[in-house]
Image: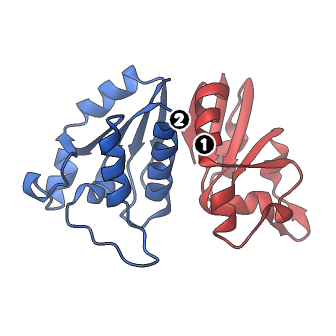
Amino acid sequence: MGKLTIGCFSSLVGSLSLDFSIKLAEAAVAKGHTVDYWMSGNATMLSKKGQKAFKDYSHLAKPVQTLLATGKFNITACEACAAARGYHKEDTMEGVKSFSMDWYLASTFEADRVLHIGGD
Amino acid sequence: MKLGVIMSDYRTGSDVIDRLTAEKLGIIFVGNGVYHAASKEAGKASSILDKTNNLYVLTEDLESRGLTSANLDSRVKAITYSDVVDLIFNDYEKTIWL
């Protein structure tokens, strides 16, 4: 089993690439791999607590919480990107970490595979 | 290098594909990229399909656009998220997102 690091540098909640990356993380964890997931830029919105599910609208908070419960999924938001958008520690979903980009760089160096999804 | 490309758009990215060289190239169509695998313009299939023999499309994204495997170009294989994970870990050393 290996480690996959996914960096998502784009995409508000509801966007296609954010949906794809979380579903890919689910599939990787289901196969026994571990996943490090980094959110940068607008993707940090995924770290916000209090996300409400609506019918026929993307709701990724629940799958993220399910992934966290496996112990094989680490998710971290860029602290500067989040703070710049008004998300602070008290606004962050339980289990989601907040660090500088050093965390992402260290993870990519340790990972067996990296998927970097660029900004839009 | 064995290089996997996840292609998520229909209108952009082709120019990048043209510039890539790899010992083995694989292209996985996801999101709106699935139209490369399942549509024709002026009767012609997407020129991206001529770049390699290793062509895949994410079934979920195909079906969410009202398309099925019956719409697929015969060179493209329909796969699941689980298959994408296997391709990333087993078939390609690097994977890029377009």
Q: What residue is at 75 percent from the left and 69 percent from the top?
A: B67
Q: What residue is at 34 percent from the left and 27 percent from the top?
A: A107
Q: Check the image and name the residue furthest to the left.
A: A90
Judge the density around disc 2: few (<14), some (14-19), many (≥20) Cα neighbours within 10 Å: some
Q: Position of residue A20 (x, y in %)?
A: 51, 54
Q: Is A74 in front, or is A16? A: A74
Q: Is residue B94 left or right of residue A15?
A: right
Disc on res. B90: none
Q: Quadrant of the C terminus of chain A?
A: bottom left
**Colour pattern:** by chain
Disc on res. B82: 1
Q: Position of residue B55 (x, y in %)?
A: 77, 44
Q: Is A8 in front, or is A37? A: A37
Chain label for disc 2 = A
Q: What residue is at 22 percent from the left and 60 percent from the top?
A: A48
- Give, as a three-letter code, the residue at label 2: Lys
- Give the labeled residue for mark 2: A31
- Which chain did the image draw in red? B
Q: SS class of the residue under badge 2? A: loop
Separation of marks 1 and 2 at Cα, in angstroms: 8 Å
Q: Position of residue B4 (x, y in %)?
A: 64, 35
Q: SS class of the residue under badge 1? A: helix
Q: Is residue B11 visible?
A: no
- Which chain did the image draw in blue? A
Q: Check the image and name the residue furthest to the bottom.
A: A55
Q: What residue is at 77 percent from the left and 65 percent from the top?
A: B68
Above or below: residue A105 compared with residue A62: above
Q: Are marks 1 and 2 in contact (CB under 8 Å)?
A: yes
Above or below: residue A100 compared with residue B43: above
- Give, as a three-letter code, the residue at label 1: Ser
Judge the density around disc 1: few (<14), some (14-19), many (≥20) Cα neighbours within 10 Å: some
Q: Is residue B59 left or right of residue A15?
A: right
